[in-house]
Image: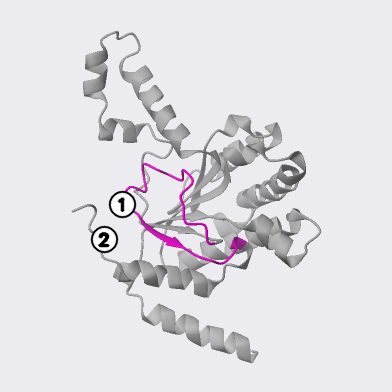
Amino acid sequence: MGIKKFVYSLYETSLLNNIEKNDLPKHIGLIHDGHRRYAREKGLLSYEVSYRIGINTFKECLSWCSNLNINHITSWLLSKENLNRPKEELGPYYKVLEELFKDFTTSDTFDDYKIRFVGSKELLPESMIDLISKVESIRSIGGKELTIALGYGGRQEILDAVKSLLEEKYPSSKNSKELVEKITDEEIRKHLYSPNSPDLDLVIRTSGEARLSGFLLWQSAYSEFVFNDVYWPEFRKIDFLRCLREYAQRERRFGK
């Protein structure tokens, strides 16, 4: 082991020793940001290289969470707005994502995961839609829950939830007052993309951007946010542990 790795190992141990297990989040949201900036700064010839590094980081992050018994992960891999990017950017990313999703179906790494996808999936390429259905069919049961936000927008989720609620409860109602009185927090929650998942405890966004950009607006109402300066492809275990340490040091009051 080189000196650098040895020092990192000591630091990781120190970070872990300063985090009580009871202070760990149960549900983490990940906003993977910074792939393109990373590629430009490193002089990479293609964004695809950066995307592949980012997917490897994602897999490593899942193992970090698993080792700490953090069993609910929601990962935002593609926003609805991202779908408007040029084909020369989306094409390589779709290719890398499809490879990841195939891995979901074959690798025993994901045997204990229930995997589901949320977002405007109908806007994705047909080959990816078919693959998503296959993943959700094969990984429909598990002790851990992984939610992949793909073509996802927070405003769209809330809009879809309200429409679904109205269609279910009042398909032919013309009484607007009745409708308004029946729309409650609990009823809307039942119609969100992941109604049975707990609210987010911690949201981590990389690349230094300090905004949510519409990520799980309803579920993150009382979440803690940690904005990390590192680009996602460079996100290390010590960066992850620092985020957990910051979370553990905060006092959560849930608006009280």
Q: Quadrant location of residue 18?
A: bottom left
Classify residue 89 as left or right of residue 1.
Answer: right
Residue 180 % position (x, y): 25, 21
Classify residue 7 as left or right of residue 210.
Answer: right
Relative to 234, residue 134 above or below: above
Which residue is located at x 64 percent, y 47 percent?
101
Q: Residue furthest right?
A: 45
Element at badge 2? loop
Relative to 186, residue 164 above or below: above
Q: Quadrant location of residue 4?
A: bottom right
Classify residue 19 as left or right of residue 193.
Answer: left
Is 218 part of what is drawn in magenta?
A: yes
Q: Residue furthest bottom?
A: 3
Residue 44 % position (x, y): 78, 62
**Magenta segment:** 208-232
In which quadrant will I find the N terminus?
bottom right
Q: Amino acid at mark 2?
A: Arg
Marked residue nearer the N-terminal end (2 or 1) = 1
Classify residue 230 as left or right of residue 155.
Answer: right
Numbered label attached to residue 222:
1
Numbered label attached to residue 193:
none
Q: Are marks 2 and 1 in contact (CB under 8 Å)?
A: yes
Q: Amino acid at mark 1?
A: Tyr
Which residue is located at x 43 percent, y 84 percent?
14
Residue 204 % position (x, y): 46, 59
Which residue is located at x 55 percent, y 39 percent?
137
According to the picture, the residue beneath numbered tag 2 turns out to be 252
Is 39 part of what is drawn in magenta?
A: no
Which residue is located at x 50 percent, y 87 percent?
10
